[in-house]
Image (cartoon, rainbow, N blue to C red):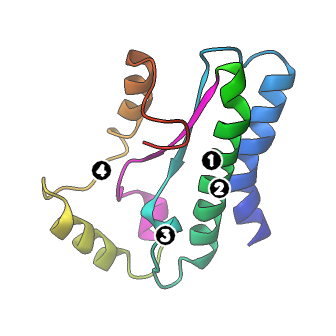
Amino acid sequence: MNMTLDVMAHSLVYWVQDLYRAGLLQEGAKVFAMTSAGGRRIWPAYGAVSAAKAALESHVRQLAVELAPVGISVNALQAGVTDTPAARKIPGSERMFAHALEFNPGRRLTTPEISPGFWLLSVCVRRIGPPGTL
């Protein structure tokens, strides 16, 4: 569980601290983290990832507050359920995909090809909502 938290949550803080100290994050910079509904929903065998996503979202809120005075925004993006090799390793993933398809208005899953579009969107806009939200 510690490795999952370090890789999926705490690494954002370490990365932002290093970039800020190196002068690579300046006014107008934007930091984005990818999250999932798993940080707020219960799913069997998803405990470590769920805890990591909840921690990541907490880090995003805190970083947003701390960096806002210097003009740096921090947001978490939630692309939706994405069919990836990692997601397929989650026990019950087929049920998770079916549930997502049922409740997605477009009746489709997010694809790995769509997720980078969120980054491109960030380049096209000055600010997306209040810091720490989307």
Kindly indicate the quadrant of the structure image that contains residue 49.
bottom right
- Of badges 2 and 4, nearer the viewer stands 2
* Residue 12 quadrant: top right
Which one is earlier in the sequence, the residue at label 1 or at label 4?
A: 1
Q: Position of residue 67 (x, y in %)?
A: 71, 30
Q: Position of residue 43 (x, y in %)?
A: 45, 80
Which residue, given by chain and number where applicable, does mark 4 sit on?
A: 110
Pointer 4 and pointer 3: residues touching (CB < 8 Å)?
no
Q: At label 2, which amino acid type do we have?
A: Ser
Q: Classify mark 1: helix, strand or loop.
A: helix
Q: CA distance from mark 3 to mark 1?
A: 15 Å
SS state under label 3 = loop
Residue assigned mark 1: 61
Q: CA distance from mark 1 to mark 4?
A: 25 Å
Dot 3 and dot 2 residues touching (CB under 8 Å): no
Residue 55 is one of the magenta-drawn residues: no
For badge 4, the amino acid type reads Thr
Residue labelled with disc 2: 58
Amino acid type at image mark 3: Arg
